[in-house]
Amino acid sequence: MRGHGLRVAIQYWEECPSHGEALARVRKVLEDENIHVKIELVRVESEEQAQRLHFVGSPTILVNDVDIDPPTTSHYGLTCRAYRLEDGRISPLPSEQMISRSIQKIKGNLKST
C-alpha cells in the first residue's frame, strides 16, 4: 500500500545514539503494516534549529508533522529524549506499538477528510 498522504520524519541529534534504532523500528512498523513511504531524516545541528523545529530531543518521530508522543514540555534543544512506555518504564525509544498507534490514528484522520 502506498502512503496515501502519510509523511514520516525522524528528527535526531547526532550525539544521541538512539536514532538508528528509531529508524529501524519505524521501518519495521511500516513494513508490518504494508505502508510504503519515504522516511525523512532531519538532522538537528544547532540550538537555533532546535528552537525553530520545536525539537524536544532525539529521536523525535513525526507522522504528518504530529509528534507520536506529544511532549509535555516546551523546552527545546540538543538533547536525548525519553519516552514513557505502555508499562510505565522510561526508554530512549518509543515502542513499536506507540509508533503503530500514531500511524493508524493519522491514517484514520486522512480517511475521514
Image (tube, rainbow, N blue to C red):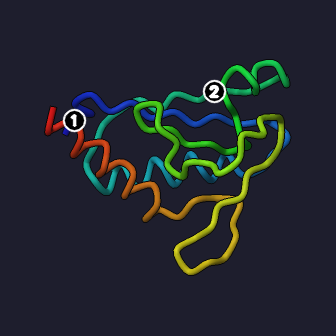
Q: Residue at x 21, y 46 (%)?
A: 108
Judged left or right of residue 81, residue 47 is right
Residue 11 at x, y percent in the picture: 64, 34
Residue 96 at x, y percent in the picture: 47, 62
Which residue in the protein does label 1 denote?
110
Amino acid of disc 2:
Val
- How far apart are labels 1 and 2 at the CA level? 24 Å
Q: Earlier in the sequence, mark 1 or mark 2?
A: 2
Q: Secondary structure at mark 1?
A: helix
Q: Quadrant of residue 55?
A: top right
Which residue in the protein does label 2 denote?
42
In the picture, the quarter occupied by the C terminus is top left
Judged left or right of residue 110, residue 61 is right
Q: Above or below — where is 89 with respect to 109?
A: below
Amino acid of disc 1:
Leu
Q: Residue at x 63, y 53 (%)?
A: 21
Residue 31 at x, y percent in the picture: 34, 50
Judged left or right of residue 61, residue 105 is left
In the picture, the quarter occupied by the N terminus is top left
